[in-house]
Image (tube, rainbow, N blue to C red):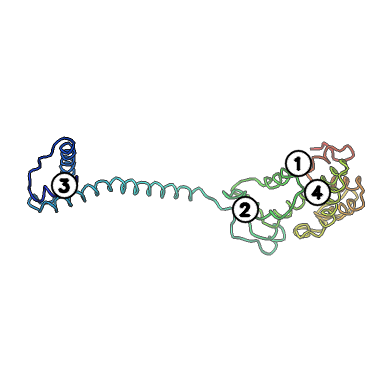
Amino acid sequence: MDDELDRLLRTGTRPVPTGDDARSLSDDVWVRIRLGVADDTPADAPADRRLVARDELAARRRRRPARVASITLAVVLAGAGTAAAADYLSTRTGEELTGWEQDAGGRGEVLNPAGTDRAEVFDQVTGDIQFPPGYESARQYVLDFYPAEADSRVTEGVLRSNVARAAVCSWADSWVAAEDAGDAVALSAATAVLTGAPAWPDIVANDFPNAEYQPDGNGRSYNGWVPPLAAAASAGDRQALLDEVAGSYACSHEVIPVIDADPDYPMAGVR
């Protein structure tokens, strides 16, 4: 019907349609008239030019709302991105300590625990330090230890050392749990891990001799309890292992739930 209407408009032939054809032609004419409103095509332009111009005008009108909507959405998204960037605080500072500060505060990059991406960065830094199966909450406890405050800082070295100490405590707890359950496989696995713990780089690093004084008056490093604990596990000496955990000053009750409930543990129930 569009082709027929175009032919009639070009030739000036008077249409004499009937029935359904008449109704269809009438509808097309009114569509053309409506699309031609506000058309700036000269009235004396050829009929085919006027029709093309009207079709282009209609297409432009259809595109205009879509363009306006696209521009508005772009502005909104740009504004949201700027606000998000303003609220973002990086956990990584790109800074490292030097000299005596490094001896006191540890090695590696200085981290801001108040950072927006704290959880991700802490996991990246300590993800290779293994805890026993089922001790995910113990690992999370030590990761959550540092307050998310603007003026709080911790180096990668100190963070890793603290997580490594908690891991040793949890493996000792796993050792006791395996012995209680008569699980020879789990006991062997825990013994193997504890035996190798004194050589862990994160146990050796960030440690200082005579950092802690024992009841007998002798000094011991922060991690000085790890070698005797490993020896107790290797020898199957349960009480010696419990005593070393109690004297470690590193094994919080949150990471040793089984040992904390053992009546033979010197610090059982102490908070």
Q: Which mark is residue 4?
A: 3
Disc on the earlier residue, 1 or 2: 2
- Foreground label between 1 and 3: 3
Left or right, 116 with respect to 48, comes to right
- Label 2 CA crowd tier, 10 Å (few <14, some 14–19, many 20+): some
Q: Nearer the viewer, mark 2 or mark 3?
A: 3
Tally of marks: 4
Alpha-carbon span between mark 3 and mark 4: 89 Å
Q: Position of residue 100 (x, y in %)?
A: 70, 62
Q: Position of residue 80 (x, y in %)?
A: 44, 47
* Left or right for 12, reference 191: left
Kindly check if marks 2 and 3 are in contact, taking CB atoms under 8 A apart as contact: no
* Within-10-Å neighbours for mark 4: few <14, some 14–19, many 20+: many
Please report whichever mark, 1 or 3, sits nearer to the chain's N-terminal start.
3
Q: Looking at the rendered structure, which numbered label has been put on residue 171?
A: 4
Report the front residue among 11 and 121. Answer: 11
Amino acid type at image mark 4: Trp
The numbered mark, 3 or 4, whose residue comes first in the sequence reads 3
* Residue occupied by mark 1: 254
Query: Which x, y percent locates residue 209?
Result: 82, 58
The reply, left or right, for residue 187 in relation to residue 75 is right
| Mark drawn on residue 121 | 2
Query: Could you say whether the residue bearing mark 1 is in a helix, strand or loop?
Result: helix
